[in-house]
Every structure is written in structure tokens, then in C-alpha cells.
Image (spheres, helix red, strand yellow):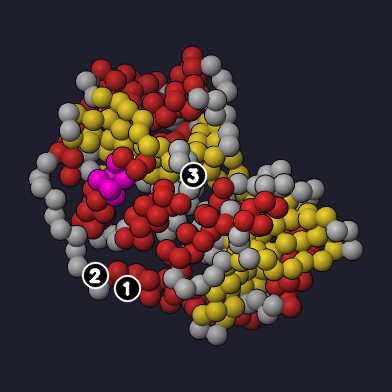
């Protein structure tokens, strides 16, 4: 017999979650609570637990928004897309989808989204009337020897890495707490000049770096004396390094410090026993081309949507209004205080951030 129940996201949730063979850090109570409090204010994230014959077979961290007369379930919420939430399951994701659908029906959910990377479940979802959308991410296997990893990289990018390494930058790997304040200040100023408010993403990065266990986030930097030439942020979990965010100072662009930093992350990940470097989304052609030039391969994942066709336009309009209301909240805030005109304050941000809500993610 299959049944489901709602569960709070707490230590008991985490204990049960870790029994799922494919669980990840983005499904934990720490991540979901921080993510929800920063991006959705007073909303409360919760979990859906599915059992069969007394055994837990699936767990879904989720957020249910009640906005403009609609009930919207997201794991993740549409427009705050990341491929890393969705179900953790024990046997087969397909076994979880029918109870999930029943829960949505009984809870009067007008619209729901979940993401996953599972071929069997994709076929099942399509054959059962779900709307599916395919997305791509870029991954580099780090188990190969460094010579093989180097040969994966395209010739032009290898030349830029060499230039960056020979230009005299100091390359370091730092725990997040040592540099996060300056890093977010520089990036916030840059985004402001581009007409983009990064306040929520900056807040989330600061708060999650404190909430997660020490060592879960690491900054890789290329310094010219005290000036930041380039930096990359990795989120570390189990056997995977997740490429979170990157910045590159345009004053140093011709010296290619960012390329040297990317190679530094690959070498560090390999030497510290990580198996995969996940570069994040690869759906925009220019972003995909850049990530694949470092020898990354393509990995697919799927978002499935479940909704009543009659309510779809109303739901999407509700989501649009909600997202715009968040942007409007930022526009009432004063601009950040300009930093001194030094090299370290003239920083550009590479596309493809993993931070929820940063444009464009996938």
C-alpha cells in the first residue's frame, strides 16, 4: 500500500533524507529553510514523504505559494529554477509520481513543477500527460588524470590558461568567510551598474555560507597584490563541486585571470578526491560554448509541470505578478555606496550563476 504525508523540514527530515541513495544538499532542511526565508519571506517550506508498505520510497522538499487566488507548488518554484531540488527516491522515481499527482489533486494545487534527471521517469511523465521541458547542464568528470583533463580543454582556452598562470597572479583557495563580504560588495555594485539588483542573491550567499557546515563553500581567487583580478565560488557536496558563481575584473581581462581560476578549480577538485565539476546551466548557446570549451560534457535534466489547462494562464500571471513584486521591492532601495575607483572594484560577472534568482540561470 502506498501513502503520503506532509512532514516538517527538520533534523528528522534530514535523517530520513540521507537514507535515499541520490539525496543532495539542496534537499536538506538547512538549504530549503534558508532559501525560502531569503526569497519568499514568511512562506514555509515543507516536505512530502511517500511510503510503500511501510518503507519510505520518495521525499520531496517543496514550497506551496498561495498567491492571487492560486495554489502553486514548486520544487523548485518556476522562475527560481535550479535542477537540484525535486525528489530524492529509493527505488524508482516513477513510483513516486502517481502519489505526488494525487497529493496535488487533493490539495487543490493549480500548478506544480518538479525537476529531475531520470530517463525512465521522463518517459513515464510524458506517457501520463505531464508537460515536460528539457534543460541542459555542463559537467566535467574529475576522476581522470590531470593530463587527460588538460587535453579535454580546447586549444584556445588552454592558451588563455597559460597566459593567466604566467601573468604573476597569486592563485589561492579560501574558505568563504574570509572573503565573502568583499566579494558580494563588488558583485552587487557591478550588477547595480548593469541595472540588475542582486540583493537577494547576495543575502542568500552570505546566509547559506554561515548555515552550511564549515568547508562546504570555497572561493578560488586570482589576486594582483591586494586587487581581485578574478574569483570563482564552488559549493562542495559529497563527490561533486558545483560551480556557483564567478567574477572577472575587466582591467585584467587581457591577462586571462578567470581562465587560470577555472583551471585551478579543476585541479583542486581532482586533487581533493571530487569526481565531478558541475558548471551549471548550459541552455544559452554562448554560455554553453564557453563551458564546453573547458572539456565539459552535456547532462540533461527535465522539469515536469502538472496543471489544469483552464487555470494555466491565471497561474502564470500570478507568478509573473509575484516575481515583479519582488523586483519592485528592490527598486525602492537606495543604490549601494560607490566603492573607491580601484582595480578590485571594477569587476564583471560571468553568466550562469547558480544563485537562485540570478539572471539568467538556465
Question: Mark 3 and mark 1: span between their CA atoms?
Answer: 31 Å
The answer to whether residue 360 shows anywhere in this view is no
Q: Is residue 337 left or right of residue 259?
A: left
The answer to whether residue 269 shows anywhere in this view is yes
**What residue appears at the point 58 percent right and 53 percent down from the top-left corner?**
28
**What residue appears at the point 74 percent right and 68 percent down from the top-left corner?**
5
Q: Position of residue 239 (x, y in %)?
A: 58, 33
**What residue appears at the point 70 percent right and 72 percent down from the top-left corner?**
104
Numbered disc 3: secondary structure? loop
Answer above or below: position of 10 versus 276. below
Is label 1 in contact with label 2 (beta carbons under 8 Å)? yes
Numbered disc 2: secondary structure? loop
**Label 3 vs label 1, nearer the camera:** 3
Q: Which residue in the protein does label 1 denote?
A: 329
Q: Position of residue 340 (x, y in %)?
A: 10, 47
Q: Which residue in the protein does label 2 denote?
A: 333
Residue 213 marker = 3
Q: Position of residue 39 (x, y in %)?
A: 43, 65
Q: Is residue 4 left or right of residue 191?
A: right
Mark nearer the N terminus (2 vs 3): 3
Relative depth, front residue between 305 and 244:
244
Q: Is residue 27 left or right of residue 348?
A: right
Q: Is residue 98 magenta?
A: no
Residue 216 marker = none
Mark nearer the N terminus (3 vs 1): 3
Please identify the quarter of the rendering in which residue 267 is found: top left
Q: Is most of the magenta stretch helix, strand or loop?
A: helix
Q: What segment carries the magenta color?
A: 179-184
Numbered disc 1: secondary structure? helix
Specify few, some or many for label 1: CA neighbours under 10 Å numbering under 14, 14-19, or 20 or more.
Answer: few
Amino acid at each position: 500500500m502506498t501513502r503520503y504525508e506532509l512532514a516538517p523540514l527538520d533534523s528528522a527530515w534530514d535523517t530520513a533524507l540521507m537514507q535515499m541513495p541520490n539525496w543532495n544538499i539542496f534537499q536538506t532542511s538547512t538549504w530549503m529553510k534558508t532559501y525560502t526565508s531569503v526569497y519568499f519571506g514568511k512562506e514555509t517550506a515543507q516536505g512530502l514523504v511517500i511510503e510503500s508498505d511501510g518503507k519510505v520510497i520518495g521525499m520531496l522538499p517543496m514550497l506551496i505559494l498561495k498567491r492571487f487566488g492560486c495554489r502553486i507548488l514548486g520544487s523548485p518554484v518556476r522562475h527560481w529554477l535550479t535542477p537540484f531540488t525535486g525528489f530524492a527516491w529509493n527505488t524508482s522515481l516513477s513510483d513516486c509520481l502517481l502519489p505526488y499527482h494525487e497529493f496535488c489533486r487533493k490539495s487543490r494545487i493549480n500548478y506544480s513543477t518538479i525537476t529531475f534527471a531520470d530517463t525512465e521517469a521522463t518517459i513515464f511523465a510524458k506517457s501520463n500527460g505531464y508537460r515536460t521541458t528539457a534543460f541542459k547542464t555542463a559537467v566535467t568528470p574529475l576522476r581522470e588524470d590531470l593530463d587527460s583533463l588538460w587535453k579535454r580543454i580546447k586549444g584556445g582556452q588552454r592558451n588563455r590558461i597559460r597566459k593567466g598562470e604566467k601573468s604573476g597572479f597569486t592563485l589561492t583557495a579560501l574558505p568563504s568567510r574570509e572573503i565573502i563580504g568583499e566579494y558580494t560588495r563588488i558583485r552587487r555594485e557591478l550588477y547595480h551598474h548593469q541595472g540588475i539588483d542582486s540583493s537577494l542573491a547576495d543575502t542568500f550567499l552570505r546566509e547559506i555560507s554561515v548555515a552550511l557546515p564549515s568547508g562546504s563553500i570555497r572561493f578560488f581567487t586570482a589576486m594582483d597584490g591586494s586587487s581581485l583580478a578574478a574569483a570563482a565560488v564552488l559549493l562542495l557536496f559529497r563527490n561533486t563541486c558545483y560551480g556557483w558563481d564567478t567574477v572577472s575584473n575587466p582591467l585584467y581581462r587581457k591577462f586571462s585571470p578567470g581562465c587560470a581560476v577555472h583551471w585551478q578549480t579543476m585541479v583542486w577538485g581532482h586533487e581533493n578526491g571530487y569526481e565531478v565539476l558541475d558548471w551549471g546551466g548550459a541552455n544559452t548557446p554562448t554560455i554553453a560554448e564557453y563551458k564546453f570549451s573547458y572539456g565539459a560534457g552535456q547532462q540533461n535534466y527535465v522539469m515536469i509541470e502538472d496543471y489544469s489547462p483552464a487555470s494555466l494562464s491565471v497561474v502564470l500571471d500570478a507568478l509573473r505578478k509575484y516575481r515583479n513584486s519582488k523586483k519592485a521591492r528592490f527598486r525602492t532601495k537606495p543604490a549601494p555606496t560607490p566603492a573607491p575607483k580601484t582595480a578590485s572594484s571594477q569587476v564583471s560577472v560571468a553568466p550562469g550563476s547558480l544563485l537562485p534568482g540570478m539572471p539568467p540561470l538556465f
